[in-house]
Amino acid sequence: MVLTFLQQPRTKALLEVSRLDKPVGTLLLLWPTVTALWIAAGGWPGWHLVFVFVFGTFLTRSAGCIVNDVSDRNFDPLVKRTRSRPFAEGRLAIKDALTLMAVFLLLALALVLTTNLPTLLLSAAAVLFAGIYPLMKRFTHLPQVILGIAFSFGIPMAFTATTGTLNETAGLLFLANLVWVVAYDTEYAMVDRDDDLLIGVKSTAILFGDLDRFMIGVLQGLFVSLLWLVGHQAGFSDFYHGFIGLITCLLFYQQWLIRDRSRDGCFRAFRHNHWVGGVLFLSVLVELVVLD
């Protein structure tokens, strides 16, 4: 019965537009958030906050995907990677998608209301940046920066929900995540660059041009450096820095994947970043739970 429901055309289209069938993007948002949560708590943060941030991440990422697809519904049919999306193929009504988005946002609001006022205010700012992100690709070559800010708000929210305040570690982790998002979303934008040039959509992949791999490498190097500073600020051991070394190796592998700028290679490099996030969380888990 459940399988039959999921296979219905309208249900399938709603799952697709909210990306519930593609968890990689959710993991990219989740790993830094739970990493911040564990750091802020100095270990296990408790079931309440784990539930709020894990479930909230799924809800807000799906809501953001719906906003993106509604905004890009006239562009998606013109891009090879997105021409099979529900709006591009006319398989879903906008009002149905927006209704689902409203449900997701209301559930997310209910979750954040169980925390505190600073976290609530930060969540409002996060929704604002997530909402304007799809429009930025029309006006600036830096929409990836806006996405990076939106994808990083879970970090200060984790700190305020846990401690009520922000500190230097939260700031460093926010900046690290921001430059990491710009790096991996540039890899993602490289997949669509030829189509985006034709339809007038802007991105860092277009801005960087032939320097794309070099600039991604610079951003990845800055990401690793900021992670090292996070560990130094938090007083982590050499085990943490060993994991950062592993992350560096993973990023070198991504450089190999994008070496010829092929669509498949760039897309694989983008998806590979969920392993980077997973290793980052594992490093903090080992540091604060296993070695404590």
Image (spheres, rainbow, N blue to C red):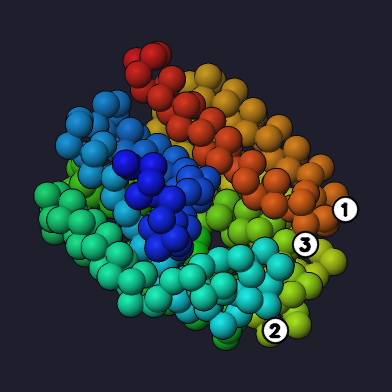
Q: Residues within 10 Å of mark 1 (few under 14, many from 20)?
A: few
The answer to whether marks 1 and 2 mark residues whose Cβ atoms lie closer than 8 Å is: no
Residue assigned mark 2: 199
Helix, strand, or loop for circle 3?
Answer: helix
User: On screen, 197 above or below 221?
Assistant: below
Label 3 or label 2, whichever lies nearer to me, is 2
Q: Is residue 249 left or right of residue 131?
A: right
Q: Is residue 94 left or right of residue 51?
A: right
| Front residue of 25 and 84 | 84
Look at label 1 and name its amino acid. Answer: Asp
In this view of the protein, which residue sits in the foreground, 155 or 98? 98
Residue placed under numbered mark 3 in the picture: 212
Classify residue 163 as left or right of residue 202.
left
Residue 148, image x, y percentages: 50, 61
Residue drawn at x 81%, y 42% is 256
Q: Residues within 10 Å of mark 2 (few under 14, many from 20)?
A: few
Image coords of residue 57 (percent x, y) = 35, 49
Q: Which residue is mark 1?
A: 260
Question: Residue lying farthest right?
Answer: 260
Q: Decide: marks 3, 1 in contact (CB < 8 A)? A: no
Helix, strand or loop at mark 1: loop
Q: CA distance from mark 1 to mark 2?
A: 23 Å
Quarter in which the C terminus is drawn = top left
